Image: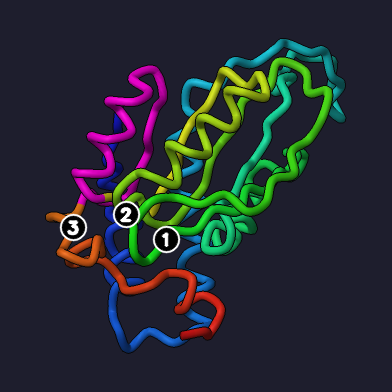
Amino acid sequence: MHVEIRHPLLQHKLSLLRDKGTKQKEFRELSSEITMLLTYEAFKDMPLSKKSLETPLTETEGYEIKDDIIIVPILRAGVGMLEGILNLLPNARVGFVGIYRDPDTKQPVEYYEKLPVNPVNPLVVIIDPMLATGGSIIATIALLRKKGFDRIKIISIISAPEGIEAVEKAYADIEIFTGHIDSYLDDHKYIVPGLGDAGDRLFGTK
């Protein structure tokens, strides 16, 4: 299942993010702000546990998230979304998966993995600014499933329809939350209209 989030604030910020004139500092800030808006929507159905607490006036009943939240950015561009999601979920644990797309075969290649151990009923959130072919995210899901993680969500800033279709075909039970579904992938597997190379724009590389 996928959800395209059409909130006006998100669409405004996404337009600024796409602009080739947006500088590195602003690109990072916008990525973080957009991630916060996407996270808000992605967690609307998060189960809560009741708890007793005391206000300055009286005792009352409140709520808390008891399950472990594990954020998994796909290196390297996913790191640019990490601050935004941790602003809303500061107690979340963080794992890292390093995957790159081979320039010749266009297939994902895993080179790094570090995940939290002994979580309690974990919900894993994979973050990556761009869901293009879906190869990296599918490979990450496969890795997580081998490690015993069953509850998984995906948050991407923009997505290609081909990538969404590929992920849903491989893992129909996983929810995808994205700020926009773009038109298509070009011959080089870049999202069109896209926003360029998110990693390069985040970190000033080329």
Which badge, 1 or 2, is on the more N-terminal residue? Answer: 1
Graded by Cα atoms within 10 Å as few (under 14), some (14 to 19) or many (20 or more), the crowding at tag 2 reads many
> Residue flagged by tag 3: what amino acid is it?
Leu
Camera-side residue of 176 and 143: 143
Q: In this view, does 119 lie above or below 5?
A: above
Question: Which residue is depicted at the point 48% across and 31% down?
Answer: 153
Graded by Cα atoms within 10 Å as few (under 14), some (14 to 19) or many (20 or more), the crowding at tag 1 reads few
Question: Which residue is depicted at the point 78% across and 14% down?
Answer: 60
Q: Distance between the residues labelled 2 and 3?
A: 12 Å
Query: Element at badge 1?
Result: loop
> Residue flagged by tag 2: what amino acid is it?
Ile
Contact (Cβ within 8 Å) of mark 1 with mark 3: no
Q: Is residue 76 above or below residue 154?
A: below
Q: Which range of residues does the magenta coloring cover?
A: 160-181
Residue 133 falls within the magenta-colored stretch? no
| Image spot of residue 143 (x, y percent) | 58, 32
Q: Nearer the viewer, mark 1 or mark 3?
A: 1
Camera-side residue of 191 and 3: 191
> Residue flagged by tag 1: what amino acid is it?
Asp
Query: Where is mark 3, residue-wise?
Result: 185
Query: Where is mark 1, residue-wise?
Result: 102
Camera-side residue of 102 and 57: 102
Which of the numbered marks, if any, corresponds to residue 158? 2
| Image spot of residue 33 (x, y percent) | 49, 60
Would residue 48 be found to the left or right of residue 125 on screen?
A: right
Question: Which residue is depicted at the point 25% across and 46% down?
Answer: 6
Q: Nearer the viewer, mark 1 or mark 2?
A: 1
Contact (Cβ within 8 Å) of mark 1 with mark 2: no
Which of the numbered marks, if any, corresponds to residue 51? none
Residue 78 position by quadrant: bottom right
Question: Furthest residue to the left?
Answer: 183
